[in-house]
């Protein structure tokens, strides 16, 4: 059995994307280079930003085809992050809303990757 512990997003500019994510995550990357930046998150997840132009084999998809999901404790946390990110100028694709799985909003990074913040409700 295995458990995935590394997530990669293909981006146009890993250094600029690292600055964007540093602002959202409240921490600096552990490694930054022109073609790759890496964050080590508190929950153990390794989160990498890889320059699309250097990915092998060539990546066909673009941002928006999936989501990086961030589970929070309650609705207040969803609303708080939404407000903070909107104030920072982060593009918001979906304002906070109740859906069948819970309360959520969706933001977009510089490359159009979807960032879903949610609290699970309705169990």
Image: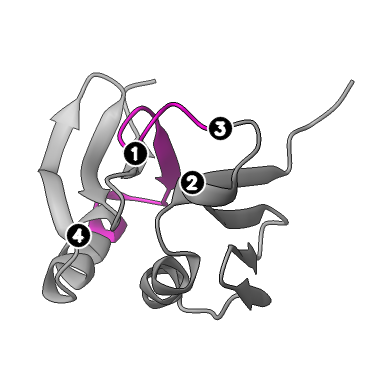
User: How is colour applied across the structure in the image?
Assistant: one colour
Counting from the top left corner in percent of width and height, residue 35 is at 58, 63
Which mark's residue is nearer the viewer, 1 or 3? 3
Q: Quadrant of residue 19?
A: bottom left
Classify residue 45 as left or right of residue 52: right
Magenta run includes residue 93: no
Q: Which residue is mark 2?
A: 10
Q: Is residue 3 above or below residue 19?
A: above
Q: Of residues 123 and 22, which is closer to you in this image?
A: 22
Circles 1 and 2 in contact, beta carbons < 8 Å: yes
* Quadrant of the rendering where the C terminus is positioned: top left
Q: Which residue is mark 1?
A: 63
Q: Of residues 120 and 82, which is closer to you in this image?
A: 82
Classify residue 93 as left or right of residue 18: left
Q: Which residue is mark 4?
A: 82
What is the distance, in whole Å, between disc 4 and disc 3 at their CAs? 34 Å
Callout 4 secondary element: helix
Q: Residues within 10 Å of mark 3 (few under 14, many from 20)?
A: few
Counting from the top left corner in percent of width and height, residue 117 is at 33, 47
Q: Which residue is mark 3?
A: 58
* Quadrant of the rendering where the N terminus is positioned: top right
Q: Is residue 58 above or below residue 21?
A: above
Counting from the top left corner in percent of width and height, residue 22 is at 45, 75
Classify residue 30 as left or right of residue 13: right
What is the distance, in whole Å, between disc 4 and disc 1 at their CAs? 20 Å
Q: Which residues are magenta?
A: 59-77
Q: Residues within 10 Å of mark 4 (few under 14, many from 20)?
A: many
Q: Of residues 12 and 65, which is closer to you in this image?
A: 12
Q: First in sequence, mark 1 or 3: give its number.
A: 3
Which mark's residue is nearer the viewer, 3 or 2? 3
Q: First in sequence, mark 4 or 3: give its number.
A: 3
Magenta run includes residue 75: yes
């Amino acid at each position: 059995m295995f458990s995935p512990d590394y997530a990669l997003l293909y981006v146009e500019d890993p250094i600029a994307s690292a600055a964007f994510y540093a602002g959202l995550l409240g921490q600096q990357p552990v490694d930054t280079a022109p073609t790759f930046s890496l964050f080590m998150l508190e929950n153990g997840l390794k989160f990498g930003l890889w320059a699309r132009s250097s990915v092998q084999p060539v990546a066909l998809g673009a941002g928006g085809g999936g989501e990086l999901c961030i589970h929070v404790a309650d609705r207040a946390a969803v609303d708080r992050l939404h407000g903070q990110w909107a104030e920072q100028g982060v593009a918001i694709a979906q304002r906070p809303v109740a859906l069948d799985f819970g309360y959520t909003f969706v933001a977009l990074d510089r490359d159009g990757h979807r960032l879903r913040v949610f609290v699970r409700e309705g169990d």
